[in-house]
Amino acid sequence: MPASGLASALIGFNLGVEAGQLLIVAALLPVLIWLQRFAWEKRLAQVSSGAIMAVGLVLLAERALIGNL
C-alpha cells in the first residue's frame, strides 16, 4: 500500500471498528437494562466478566506462547 493512502486506510478501519462496537452496545443495551430487574443480575455480571477474562487470557497465551513455535 502506498504511504499516501495509509492514513485514510487507518482512519477508515478505526471508524469501522467503532461503528461495530456501537452496534453491539445498541443491540445489547435493552437486554442489559431488562436484566437489572432480577436479583441475580450482579452474580450474572460477575460470572460473565470472569468468562470473558478467561477467554481473553487463553487468546493471549495462545498468541504469545504457542504462536511463536
Image (cartoon, helix red, strand yellow):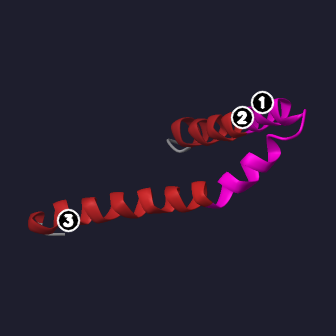
Q: Which residues are magenta?
A: 27-51
Q: As drawn, is 32 to the left or to the right of 12?
A: right
SS under mark 1: helix
Q: Residue furthest left?
A: 4
Quarter-of-image position of residue 27 = bottom right
State whether residue 35 is above or below residue 65. Answer: below
Quarter-of-image position of residue 44 = top right
Q: Which residue is mark 2?
A: 49
Q: CA distance from mark 3 to mark 2?
A: 35 Å
Residue drawn at the location 71% of the way across and 34% of the way down: 49
Q: Amino acid at mark 1?
A: Gln
Q: Which residue is mark 3?
A: 8
Q: For this rendering, which residue is in front, 4 or 36?
A: 36
SS under mark 2: helix
Q: Which residue is mark 1?
A: 46
Q: Amino acid at mark 2?
A: Ser
Return the x and y of residue 58 as percentages of the image width and height.
Answer: 66, 38
Q: CA distance from mark 1 to mark 2?
A: 5 Å
Quarter of the picture containing the N terminus is bottom left
Return the x and y of residue 65 as percentages of the image width and height.
Answer: 56, 35
Q: Main secondary structure of the magenta part?
A: helix
Q: Are marks 3 and 2 in contact (CB under 8 Å)?
A: no
Q: As drawn, is 62 to the left or to the right of 31?
A: left
